[in-house]
Image (cartoon, rainbow, N blue to C red):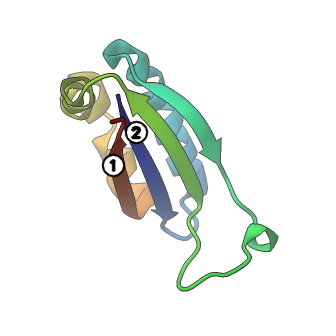
Amino acid sequence: MIYLTALMFINEGKEDVFKTYEASVLPILKDYNGKLIYRIRPKEEDYIELEGERPFEIHFISFPTHEDFVGFTKDDKRKRFENLKIDSIKTSFIVKGETL
């Protein structure tokens, strides 16, 4: 099992575009046995300490195998929404972990 933590940083004023992108691509996770375990939109007061910009959203996702994850990233349905991703996401930071 692999786990991904994604911190999503959004272009100013593009929150609705990002929400449309997420609504379009997150259901595709299931096609690759992926699970969205947590989807968090933290508020400023939720931080005890912060260095740099705070992410708009934090996702915690799992896939049974690395191949499932790669399949999701290469999915043609997902790629159809690439323009929304490019327009809305300034940057993302993904941390990958695996169960031992």
Tag shown at residue 96: 1
Q: Position of residue 45 (x, y in %)?
A: 81, 72
In the current view of this chain or complex, which residue is farthest to the front? 100
> Residue at position x 29%, y 43% from top?
82
Horizontal arrangement in the rendering, residue 50 relative to residue 30 (left or right)? right
> Residue at position x 56%, y 53% from top?
58
> Residue at position x 74%, y 77% from top?
48
Please say if 73 is above or below 63. Answer: below
Q: Position of residue 63 (x, y in %)?
A: 36, 27
- Determine crowd level at label 1: few under 14, some 14-19, many 20+ residues with C-alpha closer than 10 A: few
3D distance between C-alphas at marks 2 and 1: 6 Å
Please say if 27 is above or below 11. Answer: above
Horizontal arrangement in the rendering, residue 66 relative to residue 61 (left or right)? left
Dividing the image into 4 quarters, which one contains the C terminus?
Answer: top left
Callouts 2 and 1 close, C-beta under 8 Å = yes
Please say if 96 is above or below 45. Answer: above
The numbered mark, 2 or 1, whose residue comes first in the sequence reads 2
> Residue at position x 47%, y 30% from top?
26
Q: Position of residue 79 (x, y in %)?
A: 25, 34
* Residue assigned mark 2: 3
Dividing the image into 4 quarters, which one contains the N terminus?
Answer: top left
